[in-house]
């Protein structure tokens, strides 16, 4: 496992600093002056200008980097640019290289598995891979809360519980992360059979998607057993619980239930022929939904 920050430190930074040190020396600055501008020691400057630091060939030939170095050297040498301004320009340039540029390419070379993801930008908060991993991590945090919540097993319905969270722009169950199978009560302990995955929950994922289609902003759901005391505990804690008809399709029933209050914190149904009554806790993420379950015990 190698992070893009390691690429910046190991490959970009030595190449960039050595190029900039050379450019500043060419403009008549002493090693001491270069060291002060770059915030490094004179011995480090000496290594840079004497070629004692390995430069990355791919970056040496990068036109944008060479243009940046020349611009910074001109500004720093003339005093028209402060070291802070130079730092900001360089930071912006580095982020651009990380988002599909040379640094992203070097990262893919170091971690070949990344190349399987089209248009993957390492520092793009909206990239598919990053968002998916953040969603899975959130479900894991929620599961950890449940595992460490004394008495949670008493909230697990006969059909089992599941904790799900969807991607921000989820369209189908393949965009919803959940526990394969269900969270079960095994001898009074909540048992999680496997790590969360996408596309492994049909019923709870479908309810979440239906709630979002009906205007809810929720991205996560946890189903627990229905009991009047559970609904009362939710309401006592300040949450809004709305009933829906288990005899209708999930999409139709949830849409009707949320028509007047799309911001409801929970949905519940009291059962129907062959359908166990269940409460569905809604929230911004899996961890917060798990905390809601802990709160009502």
Image (tube, grey):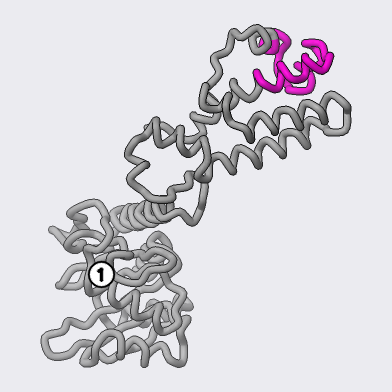
When the figure is inspected, residue 187 is found, relative to residue 276, above or below; the finding is above
Q: Horizontally, is 288 left or right of 297 in the view?
A: right
Q: Is residue 167 above or below residue 270?
A: above
In this picture, is 109 found above or below 259?
above
Quarter of image, res 90: top right
Figure quadrant of residue 64: top right
The question of residue 12 being in magenta is answered with no
* Number of numbered markers: 1
Query: 208 or 175, which lies in front?
Result: 175
Q: Is residue 15 left or right of residue 200?
A: right
Span of residues in magenta? 18-45
For disc 1, the neighbor class at 10 Å (few under 14, some 14 to 19, many from 20) is many
> Which residue is pictured at 21% across the width and 83% down the height?
277
Residue beneath the point at 45% across and 37% down: 105
> Seen in the image, is 225 located left or right of residue 126?
left
- Could you say where residue 153 lies in the image, as x and y percent from the top left? 23, 63
Q: Quadrant of the N terminus?
A: top left
Q: Residue at x 34, y 57 (%)?
A: 139
SS class, disc 1: helix
Decide whether residue 34 is among the magenta residues: yes
Residue 227 visible in rendering: yes
Is 280 above or below relative to 117? below
x, y percent for residue 37: 78, 22
The residue at the point 73 percent across, 10 percent down is 42
- Which residue is denoted by mark 1 in the rendering? 155
Q: Position of residue 38 (x, y in %)?
A: 73, 23
Residue 18, position in %: x, y?
65, 18
- Residue toward you, 50 or 91: 50
């Amino acid at each position: 496992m190698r992070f893009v920050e390691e690429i910046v430190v190991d490959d970009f930074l030595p190449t960039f600093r050595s190029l900039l040190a050379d450019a500043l020396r060419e403009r008549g600055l002493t090693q001491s002056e270069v060291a002060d501008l770059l915030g490094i020691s004179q011995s480090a400057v000496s290594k840079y200008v004497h070629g004692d630091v390995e430069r990355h060939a791919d970056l040496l030939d990068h036109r944008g980097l060479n243009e940046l170095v020349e611009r910074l050297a001109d500004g720093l040498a003339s005093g028209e640019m402060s070291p802070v301004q130079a730092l900001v320009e360089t930071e912006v340039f580095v982020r651009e290289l990380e988002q599909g540029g040379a640094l992203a390419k070097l990262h893919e070379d170091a971690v070949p598995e990344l190349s399987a993801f089209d248009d993957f930008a390492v520092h793009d908060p909206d990239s598919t891979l990053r968002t998916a991993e953040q969603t899975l991590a959130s479900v894991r945090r929620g599961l950890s809360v449940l595992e460490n919540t004394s008495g949670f097993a008493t909230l697990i319905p006969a059909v089992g519980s599941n904790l799900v969270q969807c991607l921000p722009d989820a369209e189908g169950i393949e965009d919803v992360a959940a526990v394969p199978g269900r969270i079960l009560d095994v001898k009074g302990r909540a048992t999680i059979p496997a790590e969360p995955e996408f596309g492994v929950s049909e019923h709870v994922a479908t309810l979440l998607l239906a709630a979002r289609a009906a205007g809810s902003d929720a991205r996560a759901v946890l189903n627990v057993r229905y009991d009047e005391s559970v609904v009362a505990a939710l309401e006592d804690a300040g949450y809004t619980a709305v009933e829906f008809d288990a005899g209708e399709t999930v999409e139709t029933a949830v849409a009707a239930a949320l028509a007047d209050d799309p911001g409801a914190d929970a949905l519940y149904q009291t059962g129907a022929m062959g359908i166990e009554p269940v409460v569905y806790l809604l929230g911004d993420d899996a961890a917060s939904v798990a905390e809601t379950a802990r709160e009502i015990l």
